[in-house]
Image (cartoon, rainbow, N blue to C red):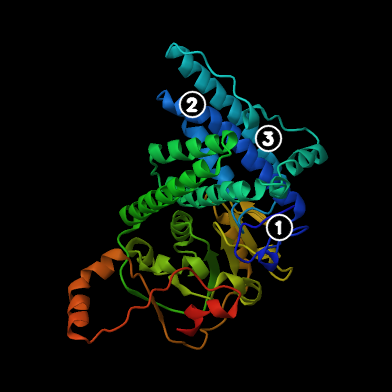
Amino acid sequence: MFCYQCEQTSQGAGCQGVGVCGKSENSATLQDLLIYAQKGISQYAYRAGKLGVRDAEVDAFTLEAIFATLTNVNFDEDTLAELVYRAAEIRDAARALYEKAAKKAGDAAETIAGPAQFQPAEDREKLLAQGRQQLISLSFAGDGRETKNLEELVIYGLKGVAAYAYHTMMLGSSAPQSYAIVHELLSRLAETNGAEDLLGMALKVGELNFEVLEQLDRAHTETFGAPRPTPVRLHGKQGKAILISGHDLHDLYQLLVQTEGTGVNIYTHGEMLPAHGYPKLNAFPHLVGNWGGAWVDQASEFAQFPGAILMTSNCIQQPKESYKGRIFTAGPVEWPGVSHIDGTDFAPVIEAALKAPGFVEDEPAVPEAMTGFGHDAVLNVAPVVIDAVKSGALKRFFLIGGCDGARSGRSYFSRS
């Protein structure tokens, strides 16, 4: 394997043999093969789209497949292999869609080479051998490094797009033009090698990320209300408990609905903290607070949490045996040996929470945190802030983006 997707990659150069995130060589290889197979789907879907035809199943699978390859999402070799086989089926559907559209338009369908012709091997070892032919490092020979780095820049940008678009899709919203651009870029990656073209594609991905994030923001606020400044409890409350992490507010909402009246309290963890700022989510009295800190601390914190744990997107780390039986994954997230929830029926998670001891008493109180400072909340006080700047009462702004990392220099949230 060779993976340099994240900023924590081994020695800042690339993971080989095993990922620092816990990703195995086989899983990484199948992820590379899945991206290759997805390019083949997009070669047909892009051409069908230019003829005014698209397919919701093809688009949805595209988001699922790309999202599965994002850092700290899907580590399960069996599931990744299934996605590769499914990709071949979806590719055939996209090809039929394109050929039908071309015939209707009176055009001759192109014979497309490259990933469009990929056929997955039935044997797992042969499938892995196919994946090893797509290793990033193989393209580094000669003058290929610069071009390959640009290709991967485009792909990693598309992985971010897929994450945003997937969550938007789960809320029942989508933008056909976004799917069209994803297919266009993946198709061009399968057929383009020029550095200048790739740089233009990378800039286009940046624009697309902004647009899709705007779509997700709109879907969140239309579904759950505009975020508003909200205090958040940071210590455990007596009672049974579920800890939910990730970014999927749709899954959180479904969990809150299903746990009403059960006596189970819901806590957010890590990236899920901002959920408390959304009025429709905060209206559930059993969404009692946030427990724990950054995602990098989950191994020690999950071991101490006295209830069930649900991971809804990323960032999962290798679970310890002490809590492996009470952690669950949902959506695109999977880890070998960890129970996975298909859909949004969280009955197994609730059952595990009821069996666990929960908090036998309230934990010692600590100061609350504040969240919910979305753009609406900030703009509502803009006149006050501007006056403070003009008067000299406000002299500095500190912009903090992202989340805590494993390195000491990225501990600003913990220290503030």
- Residue 237 in view, yes or no: no
135 vs 79, nearest the viewer: 135
Q: Height in image: 195 above or below 397? A: above
Q: Height in image: 337 above or below 364? A: above
Q: Height in image: 181 above or below 221? A: above
Disc marking residue 47: 2
Q: Earlier in the sequence, mark 3 or mark 2?
A: 2
Disc marking residue 404: none
Q: Amino acid at mark 3?
A: Tyr
Q: Amino acid at mark 1?
A: Lys
Toward which corner of the image does residue 339 lie, by quadrant? bottom right
Q: Nearer the viewer, mark 1 or mark 2?
A: 2
Q: Amino acid at mark 2?
A: Arg
Q: Nearer the viewer, mark 3 or mark 1?
A: 1
Q: Which residue is mark 1?
A: 23
Q: Earlier in the sequence, mark 1 or mark 2?
A: 1
Measure the C-alpha gap from mark 3 to mark 1.
21 Å
389 vs 227, nearest the viewer: 389
Mark 3 neighbour class, 10 Å CA radius: few under 14, some 14 to 19, many 20 or more:
some
Q: Secondary structure at mark 2?
A: helix
Residue 242: image location, x then y, percent: 54, 67
Measure the C-alpha gap from mark 1 to mark 2.
35 Å
For the C terminus, give its image quadrant. Answer: bottom left
Q: Earlier in the sequence, mark 3 or mark 1?
A: 1
Residue 88: image location, x then y, percent: 64, 31
Q: Secondary structure at mark 3?
A: helix
Residue 98: image location, x then y, percent: 51, 22
Measure the C-alpha gap from mark 3 to mark 2.
22 Å
The residue sitting at 47% across, 25% down in the picture is 48
Toward which corner of the image does residue 379 lie, by quadrant? bottom left
Q: Secondary structure at mark 1?
A: loop
Q: Which residue is mark 3?
A: 85
